């Protein structure tokens, strides 16, 4: 079953718990936690304390996306009973294999993310050791950007590599995902779609979640 991960970066922070519970109730499989440090990406979002404030809310699991430098120093902060994935960037990690093993040492699944201009060959040596590959389909750092069409072919190539090598990592797509391109992304090989403003910017969030679900069937 294909999965949907609403990004809290696009939520109304004055009603964060309420909106996290709303999307969890209406079809979300994960809450996508976008963490930005103002160094690796040109924006600052929030940290572990904000994420942990949702621990007592009735929500689905966390899918944590660390868009930060020195990720190894912060991984443990994002480990909770609700954390399923912690994803780090190839471009920000000097010793990627070691960093992935560090994540797994805390009992959570490890993922690697690639910026739009980063080729798949940069992670081929670790694909057997990851649980998820996150394909960025916009430049990381800001929500609401337009989908980069070349990402579709990148997803297809990644899915082909996965099949040919008999690997079982999940393919996640983040950036510019909409009801107009969701079906194409699933057909290309994506397993998890990250949705931000397309959901939280809707007048009727539950109805929009339902629209995505129908497109993903």
Image (cartoon, rainbow, N blue to C red):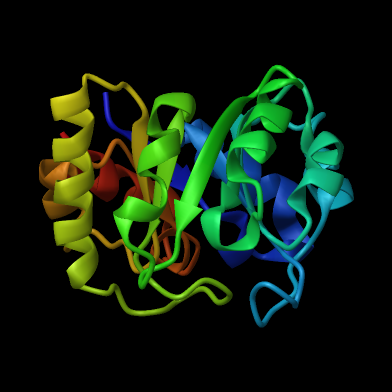
Rendered location of residue 24, percent (x, y): 54, 35
In the image: residue 177, left or right of residue 179: right
In the image: residue 153, left or right of residue 70: left
Query: 71 above or below 57?
Result: below
- The total of numbered circles placed on residues is 0
Residue placed at 74% from the left, 68% from the top? Answer: 45
Which quarter of the rendering shows the C terminus? top left
Query: 10 above or below 212?
Result: below
Whether residue 60 appears in this view of the structure is no
| Front-most of residues 103 and 18 | 103
- Picture quadrant of residue 144: bottom left
Rendered location of residue 23, percent (x, y): 52, 43
Which quarter of the rendering shows the N terminus? top left
| Front-most of residues 208 and 164 | 164
| Front-most of residues 3 and 54 | 3
In the image: residue 158, left or right of residue 46: left
Whether residue 28 appears in this view of the structure is yes
- Picture quadrant of residue 72: top right
Query: 47 above or below 64?
Result: below
Query: 94 above or below 83?
Result: below
Rendered location of residue 134, percent (x, y): 42, 48
Residue placed at 50% from the left, 62% from the top? Answer: 200
Residue placed at 76% from the left, 69% from the top? Answer: 37
| Front-most of residues 75 and 82 | 75
Q: Residue furthest bottom?
A: 42
- Picture quadrant of residue 166: top left
Residue placed at 10% from the left, 43% from the top? Answer: 187
Rendered location of residue 123, percent (x, y): 41, 47
């Amino acid at each position: 079953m294909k999965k949907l991960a609403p990004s809290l970066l696009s939520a109304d922070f004055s009603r964060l718990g309420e909106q996290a519970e709303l999307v969890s109730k209406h079809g979300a499989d994960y809450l996508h936690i976008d963490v930005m440090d103002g160094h690796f990406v040109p924006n600052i979002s929030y940290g572990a304390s904000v994420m942990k404030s949702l621990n007592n809310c009735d929500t689905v699991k966390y899918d944590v996306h660390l868009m930060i430098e020195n990720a190894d120093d912060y991984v443990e902060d994002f480990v909770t009973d609700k954390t399923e994935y912690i994803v780090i960037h190839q471009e920000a990690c000097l010793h990627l294999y070691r960093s992935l093993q560090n994540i797994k040492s805390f009992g959570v699944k490890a993922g690697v993310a690639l910026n739009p201009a980063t080729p798949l060959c940069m992670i081929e040596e670790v694909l057997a050791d990851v649980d998820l590959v996150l394909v960025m389909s916009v430049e990381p750092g800001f929500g609401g950007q337009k989908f980069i069409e070349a990402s579709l072919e990148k997803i297809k190539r990644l899915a082909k590599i996965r099949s040919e090598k008999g690997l079982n990592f999940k393919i996640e797509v983040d950036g510019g995902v909409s009801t107009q391109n969701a079906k194409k992304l699933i057909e290309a090989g994506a397993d998890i779609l990250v949705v931000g403003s397309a959901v939280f910017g809707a007048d009727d969030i539950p109805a929009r979640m339902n629209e995505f679900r129908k497109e993903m069937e």
